[in-house]
Image (tube, helix red, strand yellow):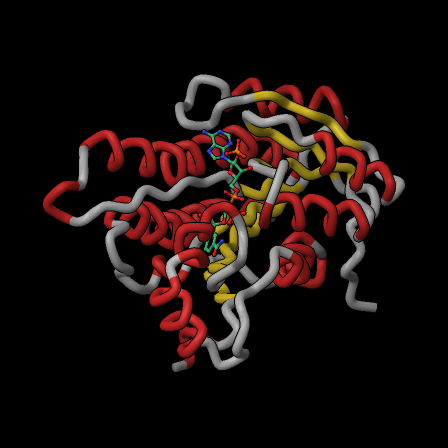
Amino acid sequence: MISFSLSGRRALVTGANTGIGQAIAVALAQAGADVAVAGRSAPDETLDMIEAAGRRAVNITADLSSTGPLARVVEETVAGLGGIDILVNNAGIIRRNDLPDFTEEDWDAVVDTNLKSLFFLSQAAARHMMAQGCGKIINIASLLSFQGGIRVPSYAAAKSGVAGVTRAMANELAPAGVQVNAIAPGYIATNNTAALQADETRNRQILERIPTGRWGRPEDIAGTAVFFAAPASDYVTGQVLAVDGGWLAR
Ligand code: NAP
């Protein structure tokens, strides 16, 4: 039997108080995993949903905009759940501005949170996964891992970097039995895209290009996350899979 069960697995999901991270954390729990969530805002609703699925939930408070707390986040996951089998690097931010006005602060904030912390949290988790001979790292990339976007240069740089570092980590960790993949969500209705949804022109342009004809929902990403976390994907590594309602196919 091909297994999509996460029974007995221990997962860490970053930025799970809302949006895509919340949907993934809950789906991992529904598939059988105990789940630690790490972020800077209270994730009470997510903790309740994990427990409602009958799984253990651990809350770790951490600002992931710098590398300082990353080792502690993994230590608290291991202490709270007894180990770490799955890491979902979901936490991320976006800053928008016209190119001539784009600031160094907006560059550093996005690259540090979306790319630098993603790599070093993966490194800290990978040390445990390598020692146990198995593990799954799932990075949340973007359509801007493939495209340039408009007014978001630091986000395009960081998410293109996420695709690269996904492949780099996959190569080094494959011999240790650890798979590293990324999900590139299309246009998903969350806080991250609130400004685009509110802009009538951009909203219409976006919808016109999505073959499925609607914005994605956070739940649309969850099934792919469960697949990348499960034994069913043990021979899949280094991939960036778009879950975009067909956007990239146009
Ligand atoms: P969201 O609702 O804004 O969620 C982002 C999450 O990241 C929140 O939990 C947020 O916490 C957390 N976060 C941000 N900065 C943090 C920090 N310094 N420390 C700890 N946590 C931090 O947006 P989302 O759409 O679900 O985004 C989730 C991921 O999907 C991001 O990596 C995003 O780039 C990616 N993505 C989204 C879309 C889309 O269309 N929505 C498309 C492609 C990729 P707070 O609530 O405290 O801010």
In this picture, residue 67 sits left or right of residue 34: left
Residue 249 falls in image quadrant: bottom left
Does residue 25 sit above or below 45 in this rendering?
below
Q: Residue at x 15, y 48 (%)?
A: 99
Residue at the extreme left: 100
The quadrant of the picture occupied by the N terminus is bottom right
Does residue 187 sit above or below 214 in this rendering?
above
Q: x, y percentage for residue 26?
A: 74, 46
Q: Residue at x 49, y 23 (%)?
A: 63
Residue 15 falls in image quadrant: top right
In this picture, residue 48 sits left or right of residue 199: right
In this picture, residue 187 sits left or right of residue 104: right
Q: Nearer the viewer, residue 175 or 136?
A: 136
Q: x, y percentage for residue 218?
A: 61, 55
Q: x, y percentage for residue 221?
A: 60, 59
Whether residue 239 is visible here, answered yes or no, is no
Q: Residue at x 14, y 41 (%)?
A: 101
In this picture, residue 197 sits left or right of residue 149: right
Does residue 129 sit above or below 214 in this rendering?
above
Q: How many numbered circles does the render carry?
A: 0
Q: Residue at x 40, y 74 (%)?
A: 248
Q: Nearer the viewer, residue 9 or 142?
A: 142
The quadrant of the picture occupied by the C terminus is bottom left
Q: x, y percentage for residue 127?
A: 55, 30
Q: Nearer the viewer, residue 115 or 101?
A: 101
Whether residue 222 is visible here, answered yes or no, is yes
